[in-house]
Amino acid sequence: MALMVEIKNLGISFGGLRAVSELDMEIKKGELYGLIGPNGAGKTTVFNLLTGVYHPDTGSFKLDGEELIGKKTIDINKAGIARTFQNIRLFKGLSVLDNVKAGLHNHYRYSTAAGIFRLPSYRNAERQMDEKAMELLKVFELDGLADHLAANLPYGQQRKLEIARALATDPKLLLLDEPAAGMNPNETQALMDTIRFVRDEFDMTILLIEHDMKLVSGICERLTVLNFGQLLAQGPTAEVLSNPQVIKAYLGE
Amino acid sequence: MKKQKLRSNLITYGIVLAAYVIVQALIAADSLSSMMKGLLVPLCVYVVLAVSLNLVVGISGELSLGHAGFMCVGAFSGAFFSKCIQDVLTFSPLRLLIAMLIGAAVAAVFGILIGIPVLRLKGDYLAIVTLAFGEIIKNVMNIFYVGIDGAGFHFSTQDEFALNLAADGRMIISGPTGITQTPKDATFTAGIILVLITLFIVLNLIDSRDGRAIMSIRDNRIAAESIGINITKYKLMAFTISAALAGAAGALYAHNLSSLTAKKFDYNTSILALVFVVLGGIGNIRGSIIAAVLLTALPELLRGLSSYRMLIYSIVLIVMMLFNWAPKALEWRERNLGRFFKTSPNK
């Protein structure tokens, strides 16, 4: 299978702290890949490097063959990477529908004047955006809540809305930062089904950070384990999770 | 949701039109004091000022304290145009229209020029720097001398004599004295039209792709960036449109005064506009209109009560604050007035 993500020798320091160093990672097209490690291992830093929030000191990162190091966040999104956040970042003052429509921003265009004067291009684009956004909301069973303010949704649905918004940008690679954080076992189970469904339905490549080992072992095909910014182990999920070094890193001696 | 928004917008336009009809009826019946008549154009100016500032403060979520600066630029460029052209173009509505367009255009240019460096800042820092820019504009206008004679325009920042005007020359802008005898083209009808145009632009902008982008940046800048929204572009767009509308309001204002001076556009005017926005409800366009009208007209209406005037004014400020922000009051409004008032911004 073709490679979607190719990371070579990625590294960044904050002052004297080597947050991530010499990270190599390859993710195949359509793969469900997990990035795990104890708190402070540098997982979210990796996400921030991949999305252009931070710029790495060393290394290269290719998405579908295209080098993305040095690009800005919005260009990286346009190149095909969308993400969710560990602490949910929705547009709380906007409706659920408008959150997803904001995600469609770069896919349906009309001029500012067309928007102000309600020209046909405005009506067409808005209608298509409504349809597309409702389609996405249906996938996450949020279509009935389209008119609600995003801030008023319960936690689990906010997480789903964040994924829907990310998918609206039509990415090749979806980064999920602790999607199950704060969910109960039932919600986690449902989330696992949703993630699998997204992968199959949208033909998506997914890289996720997660602490919930049930979720990780349940859906991830391969894993990378980080510890203190260093690569600790890499490979198929079952193999990695039974690696003595990984167990030591998580549970101590 | 769509229908609800449309209805809410129609109510806002309706309020403005109703106010216009009522005032016209009062004028026809000759039951409006000359004081109130004199207040009609400034009322429109302040409404436009408040609505346009709300675009920056409420919709874009940036605290700007330099709004009077853009009004100043618009006022001077509009009045400058009318002074130059008043003997050539005598049809006053057209002259006013062109003056307002020029005021808006020049203010928009200033909006872009100031916005590019300033919008890199956030929160308190942005507020302080916009305040400073507003004051800089005012002070620069204060030392500006422009005259015209057969040879063309003469500029100076010294005094009138430094212009070396020919005998047939005349002053247009003379420093602290500003522009005097601008043609009095401003009418209440023109003011209401400007208010309606402002509402049309702002309300439609909010409910469009660009408005969504602007509000998404307000709500979460990092997330907006992560879905490919260009932060700088949309912040600048809100800031510039807001500046242009303030410029048009300034031009209207200038055509209502016999003498236009730069010191009218100091930070007090900026703060006043911010008071309208905050008391009307941040992000609530209709609220800005009501607050601007109420707080501009009230001091005049209460003039008869002489010494109690400021007391009542401040009580009204407090009541408006509670009405818009106190949770209990919001709950009561939701229950009883839900049909007429928006309970939360942009809902």
Image (tube, grey):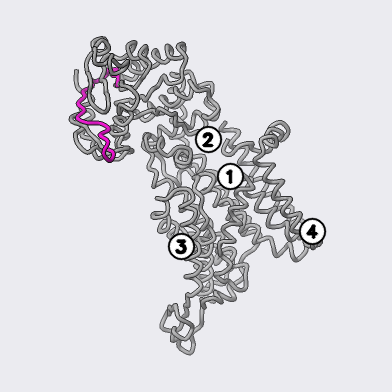
Q: Position of residue A165 (x, y in %)?
A: 42, 28
Mark-to-mark CA distance, 1 and 2 = 12 Å
Chief SS of the magenta region: strand
| Side of A201 where A148 appears, left or right | right
Mark-to-mark CA distance, 1 and 4 = 29 Å
Q: Is residue A31 magenta?
A: yes
- Residue, disc 2: A93
Q: Which mark is residue B106?
A: 3
Up-down relation of residue B272 to residue A47 (above or below): below
| Residue range highlighted in magenta | A14-35
- Residue, disc 1: B282
The part of the image, by quadrant, that contains residue B302 is bottom right
Give the amino acid at mark 3.
Val
Q: Earlier in the sequence, mark 1 or mark 4?
A: 1
Residue A206: tell me if it is visible. Answer: no
Q: Position of residue A50 (x, y in %)?
A: 28, 32
Mark-to-mark CA distance, 4 and 3 = 42 Å
Give the amino acid at mark 4.
Tyr
Mark-to-mark CA distance, 2 and 3 = 33 Å
Q: Earlier in the sequence, mark 1 or mark 3?
A: 3
Residue located 42% across and 25% down the image: A164
Letter of the chain that mark 1 sits on in the rendering: B
Tag 1 near tag 3, CB within 8 Å? no
Task: Report helix, strand or loop for mark 1.
Answer: loop
Up-down relation of residue A102 to residue A243 (above or below): below
Residue B309: tell me if it is visible. Answer: yes
The part of the image, by quadrant, that contains residue B322 is top right
Residue located 70% across and 53% down the image: B294
